[in-house]
Amino acid sequence: MSSSSTKTILLADDHDSIREITTKMLQCLGYRVIPYGSAKEVLRHLGKHQNEIDLLFIDLVMPNMCGLECIKEIRKFNNEIPIVLCSGYPVSYTHLRAHETY
C-alpha cells in the first residue's frame, strides 16, 4: 500500500459510462483512480506498478477475460492486494460465472 494519504485504486470495467461515473465518484471521495477497460490492461499495469496500487475494483463480466479470471492471474503474483469484484448482473448469474471459472 502507498504511504501517502491518497490511496490509488485500479478500476476495470468495459462499459465506458460505468467506468467514467465510478472514476468520478471515487475521485470525489479523494482517491486517485487509474481506469482501464479490460482485465488484460489491468494485468499489464500491475506487472509494472503493483506496489503503487492500494485496491482493485474489477467488473465480473468483461470480454476476453472475466474479472474472476483476472483475479486468478493477479493472485499468482500478488496475494496481498485487496480486490473488490463488481457486477451489475443478478446474484444468480454471478454465482453461475464463479462456478464456471473455479
Image: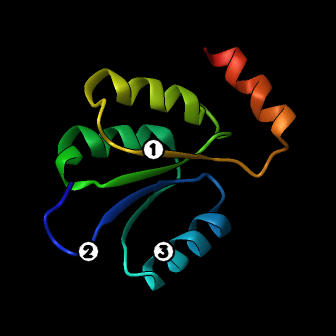
The residue type indicated by label 1 comes to: Ile
Q: Which of pointers 2 and 1 lies earlier in the amino acid sequence? A: 2
Q: Which residue is mark 2?
A: 6
Residue 97, above or below 91: above
Q: Which residue is mark 1?
A: 83
Q: Nearer the viewer, residue 86 or 80?
A: 80
Residue 66 shown left or right of residue 50 in the figure = right
Residue 34 shown left or right of residue 51 in the figure = right
Q: Residue at x 19, y 43 (%)?
A: 48
Q: Which residue is mark 3?
A: 26
| Picture quadrant of residue 40 | top left
Q: Residues within 10 Å of mark 1 (few under 14, many from 20)?
A: some
Could you tell me how far apart the alpha carbons at marks 2 and 1 are, in whole angstroms? 18 Å
Q: Position of residue 30 (x, y in %)?
A: 38, 81
Residue 72, above or below 10: above
Q: Position of residue 16 (x, y in %)?
A: 62, 64
Q: Nearer the viewer, residue 3 or 63?
A: 3
Q: Residue at x 48, y 74 (%)?
A: 26
Which colouring convention does the figure follow? rainbow
Q: Residues within 10 Å of mark 2 (few under 14, many from 20)?
A: few
Tag of residue 72: none
Q: Which of pointers 1 and 3 lies earlier in the amino acid sequence? A: 3
Q: Position of residue 53 (x, y in %)?
A: 27, 54
